[in-house]
Image: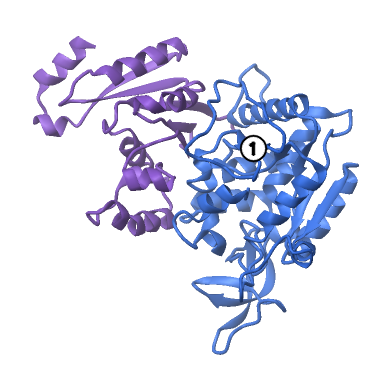
Amino acid sequence: MSSIDLLRFNTSGSVDDGKSTLIGRLLYDSKSLMEDQIEALERSADITGGGQINLANLTDGLRAEREQGITIDVAYRYFATPRRKFIIADTPGHVQYTRNMVTGASTANLSIVLVDARAGVIEQSRRHTAIASLLQIPHVIVAVNKMDLVDWSEARFNEIRDEF
Amino acid sequence: MPTDYHIDHLQHLESEAIHIMREVAGEFERPALLFSGGKDSICLLRLAEKAFRPSDIPMPFLNVDTGHHFPELNEFRDRRAKELGGKLIVRKVEDAIAKGIAVPAPGEISRNKLQIPTLLAAIDEFRFDACIGGARRDEEKARAKERFFSFRDSFGQWDPKNQRPELWNLYNGRLNEGENMRIFPLSNWTEMDVWQYIKREKLEVPSIYFSHRRTCVRRHGQWLPVTDILPPRAGERVEEVTVRVRTIGDIISTGCVESPATNYDDIIAEIAAARVTERGSRADDKASEAAMEDRKKQGYF
């Protein structure tokens, strides 16, 4: 049997910076979503309103999370490519759930800190980066998200990069 | 096997699970290992062997028999427990109903929910403080939220909104009287990992995981096995089909999948190409979006 590596990573950053949605998108694009999961998403579209599929519902597995549209506790998802197997921890952004964020981040080899391009580097971005550093996570990626909402402004991107 | 010091993903998952097995033996006084004879618990037994041999496995095996099990599964369960020299405790839903521990709702045929009081009564009877189960996070989205060490209060209930921190490989086993812990060493395993491990370790599995001929009835887009407890209804299509089971629940709720798979490699290839999840063939999970979460809160695995 061929030898496959394992990469464990987590997504962090503030509430609504798009952590769960990023994971949903990764799973969707890597064709890791099964037909019955997509069907379940379509069924749950009515709960969160709008009638649109909400990719965040993939990892927000608790009823309270779906109703409130927030992540309370860490959810783990799995996908694989021919070269690598991935374990993703989708960690909560609210400050009162930081202990759950730490739980998910503690076993990660890589941490993705998401930053909303409109809000820039805020308290939670810094807190989660500091936690990643405390936990000695070997790799950190800062991802500037929601660039479409700042009209893909390169100046805004560079500003956030410099601030970080 | 690799000859260098590189650890591949199966070895990584294996060592994580063995560590947890030993933690359970070290931290708890009366642990039990839930063994149904299904593929996940077959892996648990091999991990227990690796964790504790040449000593005896320091915990009994426990199974809640719904009375609706596949006979092939129970035969395998009893034989495997004997081969390993383990003590197998079986508690039956029927007995729990007779004693008034489990009360079926009017017209309720499924034994799925009735497993919960039966299991809780067994935990009470033997005063188990920890139960190891083969549940995996990839199976279902409520399970994706659960810790390796999942705390249950004195009513056996899970509080998903108030789980304990669980950092690195440190597990908090602190309990008060009457509380217990559910422990899931296979949390990070996927269906694919389980089959790759079964293949690597050359583990025997019940024959129903492989392709066989079975009389089934077509219902809700699935092939359900025809038995005394699940007779076909008027107008339903009954056929002899070549099927296998992908996940094993009760015989009345387990959809069989049409498959020619006769060995491990066939199954692995089939899973790689699958477009629906394993649990897609389990009627008990389709009851509602929070079906699993609700059952777990009541004490289900």
Q: Tell me where residue B26 sits by quadrant.
A: top right
Output the chain of dot 1. Answer: B
Left or right, residue A100 beside residue B87: left
| Disc 1: CA contacts within 10 A as few (<14), some (14-19) or many (>=20) | many
Left or right, residue A117 beside residue A107: left
- Residue at screen point 62% across, 39% down: B153
Judge whether A76 appears above or below B205 on screen: above
Q: Secondary structure at mark 1?
A: loop
* Residue type indicated by callout 1: Phe
Q: Answer yes or no: is residue A101 visible.
A: yes
- Residue at screen point 55% across, 30% down: A4
Judging from the image, the colouring scheme is by chain
- Residue at screen point 35% across, 38% down: A26
On the image, the x and y values in percent for residue A118 come to 15, 26
On the image, the x and y values in percent for residue A98 come to 41, 24
- Residue at screen point 72% across, 66% down: B68
Q: Tell me where residue B45 sits by quadrant.
A: top right
Q: Tell me where residue B33 sits by quadrant.
A: top right
Q: Answer yes or no: is residue A31 visible.
A: no
The residue nearer to you, when weighing B16 against B167, is: B167
Query: What is the count of numbered marks?
Result: 1
Q: Colour of chain A?
A: purple
On the image, the x and y values in percent for residue B122 come to 77, 50
Left or right, residue B170 beside residue A89: right
Q: Colour of chain B?
A: blue
The N terminus of chain B - image quarter = top right
| Disc 1: which residue | B184
The residue nearer to you, when weighing A157 against B260, is: A157
On the image, the x and y values in percent for residue B123 come to 75, 45
The residue nearer to you, when weighing B209 against B278, is: B278
